[in-house]
């Protein structure tokens, strides 16, 4: 029998996760669910809906709401993390400050993602230390907190914790391909880092031809999290793969910055409005299902990715999922210790990334550059070192300009001072 802990349960995404747990509660032999958040009003609101969802689904176990992280982790078998230090106010700053310097502000990519990482990585590392001390010896952390890839880079290389880094990009990309070709009967190859990934091969069952170049630029793999910029079709001759929608920020940098500058509201402000409306619905004592409006928030199919990954590990189903994992030779041009996002086999023995065969030199160059940025960002977050932080921004392909990076770094650090004790003592 398993105890499940949800850290950051006051998130508006929680009904999505609970829906997935309801569907698999019996298979996972869930005995109890501990919902933890430091924001008590949010916890009570989302916890109330979660209880109603679980009750409707026939769950008979204990459901606990707590502000005590240690209590939530105690004896847990699976820990889902969906935290956001700095809350939405921090995200909005992350988006708006870089735009003052003509640089992209985005939750997980570029300077905005960098700042999110500085706030979040130390908190996750503390959580992992508590998990190792209090949870089951074979407990698994399934992280959905952003920036997911940088957090995976930190946890997988700085601890020996069992950890899965997850994102809903891949599962939505596969759905987009299935819609485009009219079937899910196909094999595919996936390579990248979190929010920097491509599907490089699509082969229908019973056939041998890789049809990915016919789909590049045509299959709808867009996400609600980011605006879609126009991409010249010529690019798909140079990089003939299906990109995650976050690659719009690399493929069309100037247009993306222009779109953000011209927008009446940044994405964070839009999300605040969406969340306010969702919370009004969540407060309805008769609501006991995930409302369809949650899809507007951008977390589509995240529960499917998260809970199915947990099920594959705990029940030793040996299924293949796209997750962030230590490379260990799967991507031949990356270091073995690098956290990469690839197709991986998940079972009781952990995560085994599958070898990647299809890629080109553009993919090689961009992945290596962004991985250098990620490694520097982890060091900066854990050491509180401004020089390393500046080096990280200079390494990022979307920043890389000292005249912008230095004042931007200083302003963003000062704006987030209360969340950065390693930088400010």
Image (cartoon, rainbow, N blue to C red):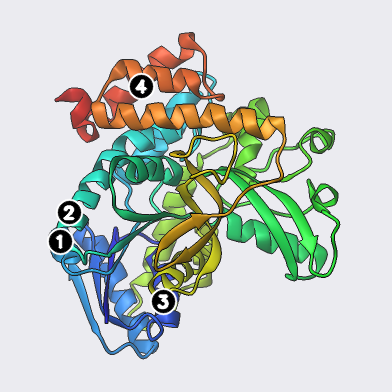
From the viewer's perspective, is residue 193 above or below residue 52?
Answer: above
In which quarter of the view is residue 180 placed? bottom right
- First in sequence: mark 1 or mark 4? 1
Judge the density around disc 4: few (<14), some (14-19), many (≥20) Cα neighbours within 10 Å: many
Left or right of 52 in this view: 363: right
Proximity of marks 2 and 3: CB atoms separated by less than 8 Å: no
- Dot 2 alpha-carbon crowd within 10 angstroms: few under 14, some 14 to 19, many 20 or more: some
Residue depicted at x 50% and y 70%: 318
Instruction: Report, in whole angstroms, how far the alpha carbon at label 2 lies from the one at label 1.
Output: 6 Å
Which secondary structure lies at badge 1? helix
Q: Are marks 2 and 1 in contact (CB under 8 Å)?
A: yes
Q: Pick whichever, 69 or 55, lies toward us.
A: 69
Does dot 4 land on a helix, a strand or a loop? helix
Splitting the image into 4 quarters, where does residue 235 fall?
top right
> Could you tell me residue 75's position as x and y percent?
18, 69
The quadrant the N terminus occupies is bottom left
Q: 400 or 374: which is nearer to us? A: 374
Q: Which residue is mark 3?
A: 315
Marks 2 and 3: which is nearer the front? Answer: 3
User: Is residue 38 visible to us here?
Assistant: no
Do residues under tags 1 and 4 come within 8 Å of each other at their CB atoms? no
On the image, the x and y values in percent for residue 381 come to 30, 31
Per the image, label 3 sits on a secondary structure element best described as: loop
- In this rendering, is residue 327 above or below 93? below
Do labels 3 and 1 touch, CB within 8 Å?
A: no
Task: Name the residue beneath numbered marker 2.
Answer: 130
The disc label shown at residue 389, or none? 4
Which residue bears the numbered disc 1?
A: 134
């Amino acid at each position: 029998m398993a105890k499940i802990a949800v850290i950051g349960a006051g998130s508006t995404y929680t009904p999505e996760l609970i829906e997935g747990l309801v569907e698999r509660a019996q298979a996972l032999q869930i005995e109890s669910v501990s919902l933890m958040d430091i924001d008590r009003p949010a916890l009570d609101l989302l916890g109330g809906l979660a209880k109603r969802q679980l009750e409707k689904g026939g769950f008979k176990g204990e459901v606990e709401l707590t502000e005590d992280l240690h209590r939530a982790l105690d004896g847990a078998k699976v820990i889902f993390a969906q935290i956001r230090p700095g809350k939405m106010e921090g995200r909005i700053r992350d988006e708006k400050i870089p735009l003052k310097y003509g640089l992209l502000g985005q939750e997980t990519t570029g300077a905005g993602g960098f700042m999110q990482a500085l706030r979040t990585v130390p908190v996750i590392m503390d959580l992992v230390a508590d998990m190792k001390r209090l949870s089951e010896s074979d407990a698994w952390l399934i992280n959905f907190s952003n920036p997911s890839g940088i957090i995976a880079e930190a946890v997988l290389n700085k601890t020996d914790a069992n950890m899965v880094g997850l994102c809903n990009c891949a599962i939505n990309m596969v759905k987009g391909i299935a819609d485009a070709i009219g079937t899910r009967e196909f094999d595919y190859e996936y390579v990248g880092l979190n929010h920097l990934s491509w599907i490089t091969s699509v082969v229908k069952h019973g056939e041998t031809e890789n049809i990915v170049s016919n789909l590049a630029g045509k299959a709808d793999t867009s996400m609600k999290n980011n605006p879609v910029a126009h991409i010249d079709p010529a690019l798909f001759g140079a990089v003939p793969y299906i990109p995650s929608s976050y690659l719009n920020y690399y493929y069309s940098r100037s247009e993306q910055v222009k779109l953000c500058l011209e927008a009446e509201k940044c994405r964070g402000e839009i999300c605040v409005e969406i969340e306010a409306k969702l919370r009004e619905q969540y407060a309805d004592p008769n609501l006991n299902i995930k409302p369809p409006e949650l899809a507007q928030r951008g977390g589509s199919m995240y529960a499917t990715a998260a809970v199915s990954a947990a099920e594959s590990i705990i029940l030793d189903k040996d299924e293949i999922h796209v997750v962030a994992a230590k490379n260990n030779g799967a991507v031949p041009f990356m270091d073995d210790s690098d956290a990469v996002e690839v197709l991986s086999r998940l079972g009781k023995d952990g995560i085994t990334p599958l070898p990647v065969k299809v890629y080109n030199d553009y993919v090689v160059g961009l992945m290596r550059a962004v991985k250098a940025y990620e490694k520097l960002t982890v060091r900066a977050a854990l050491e509180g070192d401004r020089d390393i932080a500046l080096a990280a921004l200079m390494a990022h392909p979307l920043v890389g300009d000292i005249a912008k990076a230095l004042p931007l770094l200083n302003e963003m650090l000062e704006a987030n001072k209360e969340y950065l004790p390693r930088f400010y003592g």
